[in-house]
Image (cartoon, rainbow, N blue to C red):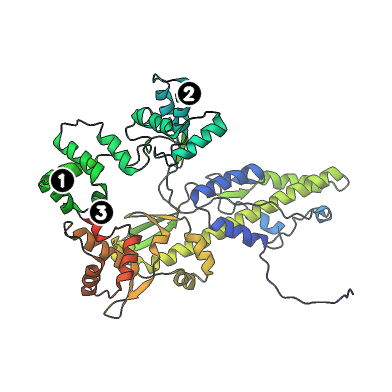
């Protein structure tokens, strides 16, 4: 049985302006510029202010608006009668601000090159080979990955050739074509089914009567596991050689490439984009001055021409076409003003956030030493600025700062804290820096184990567990002691 009843609910809903602002905040400079260009194209009521324009270019519109919301511009007829249900179309844009930051070239660099597949296919067509074998070779080349390896099982390729190409062959035949044709192509090492085979294919191309090369080939062929595990003493005993002989062989192996296809442009076109800092941080007379990068985003204003057109059309109360035109222009003017307001709010949010970060990490920006970094989390910055933690997260996302010590990724300035023996809170980044320094100075013939690192850092006042050392070491991309061993 159906019943009707009233229910009162209390909820929160984000206004379109708030959603717009959040989208703008998380964009970095390059994305910001692209959105600005798009908005300028879509909204003719929005334009770039000229250099000689005054700061209050669009302030004359304030009297036409009853507040900063979406109130209508005053006209001789009520355009609200013709308002559509859709919200005005305002989107993201760019307008960072600083008085004198550097000019950055943000043009994408397009480079076109030959793919590995094309390079190998050209070569195989120059080989004296039957038509069927050529098709098999081409199919093998097509199955190579971007590093030049054949990762698929030969049996699977044999099945594929039968079903998709109508070529019925055997595993032995495909192996023969791979080893005698594909793996003979340039670059050496292409078509390998693993790292060991890739390195062997390369070393075999070198002069065989060279002692170091011959030893390197034997090590790769028969002692590969000992080599990868750096069991050097085992190799020395196996071949009854001196340590210098092994060093020479290892030097030859180090010249080989584990990814022979890496030098080829696998997508034909590669786009390289330069990092453009969103912030500029200067240090003058012991003071750290944060600014927003503005060279890539000109100042915007509402079009005076469109305001005049609206006034003209609004005087004609009788023409339906003029009313519709006035409605369209009014919506574009509203969207332009909202857009400029959103950019101003974005600038204010970004500037307050970077100011709080600079205040917190002043010593770091002055010295450039990561040991000066203080423990800082998003909540610390949120408490200073009064913004929500999610807002701070959006600000630092994908943002960079140009500092006297180089380009800094903002997220790298945040870290948790640990308490040292003196009861002081220190940044985990500081501990990682000390860990890196200790490992850099270790005796590479006898690298320090994680247990030894625990003892050394404890002597320096950092009482941390072995598992924490292992975690920090992995975060720094430092291998275990066994794999850091050198002769």
Q: CA distance from mark 2 to mark 1?
A: 46 Å
Q: Residue 421: which quarter of the image? A: bottom left
Q: Is residue 277 above or below residue 359?
A: above
Instruction: Name the mark on residue 229.
Output: 3
The picture places residue 179, in percent across and down from the top left corner, at: 36, 31
Q: CA distance from mark 1 to mark 3?
A: 16 Å
Q: Are marks 3 and 2 in contact (CB under 8 Å)?
A: no
Q: Is residue 261 above or below residue 127?
A: below
Residue 49 visible from this viewpoint: no
Work out whether mark 1 precedes mark 3 in sequence or the reverse, and give the earlier one.
3
Instruction: Name the mark on residue 247.
Output: 1
Q: Is residue 90 above or below residue 273?
A: below
Q: Nearer the viewer, mark 1 or mark 3?
A: 3
The crowd level at tag 2 (other Cα within 10 Å; few <14, some 14-19, many 20+) is few
Closer to us: 41 or 71:
41
Name which residue lies at 22% across and 72% down: 455
Left or right of 295? Residue 187 is: left
Q: Nearer the viewer, mark 3 or mark 2?
A: 2
Residue 248 visible from this viewpoint: yes
Image quadrant occupied by the N terminus? bottom right
> Element at badge 1?
helix
The picture places residue 54, in percent across and down from the top left corner, at: 56, 50
Q: CA distance from mark 3 to mark 2?
A: 43 Å
Name which residue lies at 33% across and 70% down: 467
Left or right of 8? Residue 481 is: left
Name which residue lies at 80% across and 77% down: 7
The picture places residue 251, in percent across and down from the top left corner, at: 19, 42
Closer to us: 378 or 471:
471
Q: Which residue is mark 2?
A: 132
> Element at badge 3?
loop
Q: Are marks 2 and 1 in contact (CB under 8 Å)?
A: no
> Element at badge 2?
helix
């Amino acid at each position: 049985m159906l019943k009707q009843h009233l229910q009162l609910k209390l909820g929160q809903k984000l206004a379109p302006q708030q959603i717009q602002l959040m989208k703008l905040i998380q964009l970095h400079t390059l994305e910001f510029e692209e959105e600005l260009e798009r908005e300028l194209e879509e909204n003719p009521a929005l334009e770039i202010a000229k250099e000689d324009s005054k700061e209050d270019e669009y302030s004359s519109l304030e009297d036409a608006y009853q507040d900063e919301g979406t109130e209508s511009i005053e006209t001789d007829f009520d355009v609200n009668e013709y308002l559509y249900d859709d919200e005005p179309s305002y989107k993201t844009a760019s307008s960072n601000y600083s008085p004198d930051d550097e000019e950055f070239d943000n043009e994408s660099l397009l480079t076109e090159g030959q793919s590995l597949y094309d390079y190998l296919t050209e070569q195989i067509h120059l080989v004296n080979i039957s038509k069927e074998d050529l098709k098999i070779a081409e199919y093998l080349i097509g199955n190579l990955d971007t590093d030049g390896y054949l990762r698929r099982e030969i049996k699977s390729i044999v099945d594929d050739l039968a079903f998709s190409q109508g070529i019925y062959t055997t595993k032995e035949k495909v192996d023969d074509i791979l080893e005698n044709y594909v793996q003979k192509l340039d670059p050496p090492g292409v078509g390998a089914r693993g790292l060991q085979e890739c390195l062997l294919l390369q070393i075999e191309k070198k002069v065989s009567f060279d002692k170091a090369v011959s030893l390197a080939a034997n090590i790769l062929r028969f002692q590969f596991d000992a080599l990868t595990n750096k069991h050097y003493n085992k190799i020395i005993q196996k071949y009854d050689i001196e340590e210098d002989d092994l060093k020479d062989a290892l030097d030859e192996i180090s010249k080989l490439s584990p990814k022979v296809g890496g030098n080829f442009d696998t997508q034909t076109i590669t786009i390289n984009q330069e990092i453009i800092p969103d912030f500029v941080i200067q240090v003058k007379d012991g003071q750290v001055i944060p600014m927003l990068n503005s060279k890539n985003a000109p100042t915007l204003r509402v079009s005076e021409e469109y305001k005049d057109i609206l006034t003209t059309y609004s005087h004609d109360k009788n023409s339906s076409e003029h009313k519709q035109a006035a409605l369209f222009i009014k919506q574009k003017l509203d969207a332009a003003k909202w857009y400029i307001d959103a950019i101003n709010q974005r600038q204010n949010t970004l500037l307050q956030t970077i100011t709080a970060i600079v205040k917190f990490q002043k010593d770091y920006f002055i010295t450039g030493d990561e040991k000066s970094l203080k423990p800082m989390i998003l909540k610390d910055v949120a408490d200073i600025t009064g913004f929500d933690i999610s807002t701070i997260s959006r600000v630092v996302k994908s943002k960079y700062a140009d500092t006297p010590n180089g380009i800094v990724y903002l997220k790298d300035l945040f870290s948790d804290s640990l308490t040292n023996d003196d009861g002081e809170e220190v940044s985990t980044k500081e501990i990682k820096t000390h860990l890196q320094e200790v490992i850099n100075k270790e005796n590479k013939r006898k690298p320090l184990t994680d247990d030894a690192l625990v003892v050394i850092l404890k002597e320096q006042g950092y009482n941390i567990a072995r598992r924490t050392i292992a975690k920090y070491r992995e975060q720094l991309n430092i291998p275990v002691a066994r794999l850091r061993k050198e002769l």
